[in-house]
Amino acid sequence: MITPVTETPQVREAGATARALRATRRRRAVRALTATTGLTAVVIGLFVLTMMVGSFRLTAQEVVTSVLHLADNPSVDFVVRGLRLPTALSALTVGLALGSSGTVFQQLLRNPLASPDFVGITAGASLAAVTGIVLFQVGGLAVCLLALGGAIAAALLMYVLAWRDGVSGYRFILIGIGVAVFFEGITGYMLTRAELFEARQAMHWLTGSVGQASDAELKLLSAALVVLLPLAVLLSRRLRVLELGDDSARALGARVERTRALLLGTAVLLVALAVAVAGPIVFVALVAGPIANRLLGPATGGIAAAALVGAALLLSADLIAVHLLPTPLPTGVVTGAVGAPYLLWLLATTNRQGAGG
């Protein structure tokens, strides 16, 4: 005779907890999928809209058929592929790079103010680019490569200076701010020694604009995104482990410093390439992650969602800068005007909550 198994209260409680956890995971997955799908649709819409508006207006069908080579219309193809597609593609790729790198920095350093704009990486790229423009009168791809090298060199310098048996997020941010101020001072000095033409060229680059990228620079950034953005998404699971703290991460078997270096390297390459292509477009990396987290709800920390938010922000800023203002302006002017009030609000709320450090 088989004795029936009696279900104890502890077993029932464990089963209820497991079911609740599975339900929570399903809700988070659905929320993340819905938000990411919606953001993808918004980015595609803005990407097409960017190529529709202008002195020669086009329909969405004309833009799509021209981009996909589905029709042969020389006048439309010239406007879309020759004039508008490079700018739209630059805004899309730079926005994806800035949004993804910004949220990696914020999560890895556990600080909402930990944006590449403030921790010296952008300043390093700016110093190298201005030095090339002022001292060596270079332009185009050479400025791009100098900015890329400057950003990487600045990141390596900060990593070495911040190393004390590991890298602390708080120490990295403080050293990054100091390095940024130092580099910005040298950049200002370089501008005072420049001739008028080189100074104007350098100031235009420092403002940041998605319309200044060449085909070679766009190809470089697009190829890098194909590799680095999926890598950042794959590393997001390790990033969540690091957010628990170094001791907890080690207890879970994570190689803390190796993982942190890999994540930082990926984020640095993304932002360095973005700045090299479009100049230092401020605040996109800072705000993309928090906006994505608001949309994701409990499923916070999505790198793909933050990248899409960055692309949407930069495409919108370019539309405003070129088509909605009385005089066309560089994209960085619009992002700065919108981002500065957000930074003030973030500083005030962070101070009240005692967070951020």
Image (cartoon, helix red, strand yellow):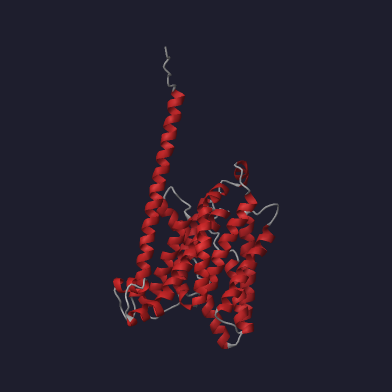
Q: Is residue 150 left or right of residue 48?
A: right
What x and y, as percent, mark residue 248? 60, 43
What x and y, as percent, mark residue 235? 54, 53
Q: Quadrant of the N terminus?
A: top left
Asked if one can make out residue 249 in the rendered structure from this viewpoint, the answer is yes
Q: Is residue 155 left or right of residue 8?
A: right
Asked if one can make out residue 278 in the rendered structure from this viewpoint, the answer is no
What x and y, as percent, mark residue 217? 52, 74
Residue located farthest toward the right when viewing the structure as drawn: 165
Compared with 316, 75 (above or below) is: below
Q: Residue at x 41, y 17 (%)?
A: 4
Compared with 236, 308 (above or below) is: below
Nearer-the-camera pick, 340 or 307: 307
Nearer-the-camera pick, 262 or 154: 262
Q: Is residue 61 left or right of residue 186?
A: left
Q: Is residue 349 left or right of residue 138?
A: left
User: Number of marks in the image?
Assistant: 0
The image quadrant that residue 201 belongs to is bottom right
The image quadrant that residue 2 belongs to is top left
Q: Residue at x 44, y 75 (%)?
A: 86
Residue located farthest toward the top when viewing the structure as drawn: 1
Q: Residue at x 38, y 64 (%)?
A: 43
What x and y, as percent, mark residue 38? 36, 57
